[in-house]
Amino acid sequence: MLSGVLAVGVACSGSDGDADDPACPDGFTRSESTSDAAGPGAATREDAVRTELERRQMTASDEAIAAGVVASAPGESTGTEDLVVRNEQGVEVTMLLAPLDPGWAVERSSWCEPI
């Protein structure tokens, strides 16, 4: 079960950011969400991503979600995965996916949205 969700907006300009946290274009702000993940989680990584998108009132195609999972990279702690999914509005959502016992959950996500 997920609890303790926090969403934060941080103003970005086209010249701010670094390779790990790309800047938002002018007129957009970086939003970030974190949660305290505890099991049981979603049965699959794809389901965990889909649940996070729904929680943010976003949608992405099954193909976009699968592509993000397949292209994921090792995260900052053992067993976690960093992944990016482009939602149906064309916004890239960066997520940190964590294994639970049992299942999977998104611990953190960030995206750009209009100011």
Image (cartoon, rainbow, N blue to C red):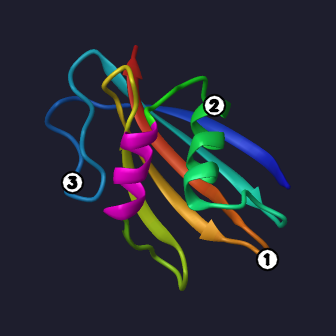
Residue denoted by label 1: 101
Q: Amino acid at mark 1?
A: Asp
Does residue 10 appear left or right of residue 35 in this picture?
Answer: left
- The nearer-to-camera label among 2 and 3 is 2
**Residue sitting nearer the eye, 21 or 70:** 70
Does residue 43 appear left or right of residue 28 in this picture?
Answer: right
Q: Residue furthest front?
A: 63
- Which quadrant would the N terminus be assigned to in this image? bottom right
Q: Secondary structure at mark 2?
A: helix
**Coordinates of residue 50 in the picture (x, y in percent):** 59, 41
Q: Is mark 2 in CB contact (under 8 Å) with mark 1?
A: no
88 above or below 115? Answer: below
Does residue 17 appear left or right of residue 33 in this picture?
Answer: left
Residue denoted by label 2: 54
Q: Is mark 2 in CB contact (under 8 Å) with mark 3?
A: no
Q: Secondary structure at mark 3?
A: loop
Q: Which residues are magenta?
A: 62-71
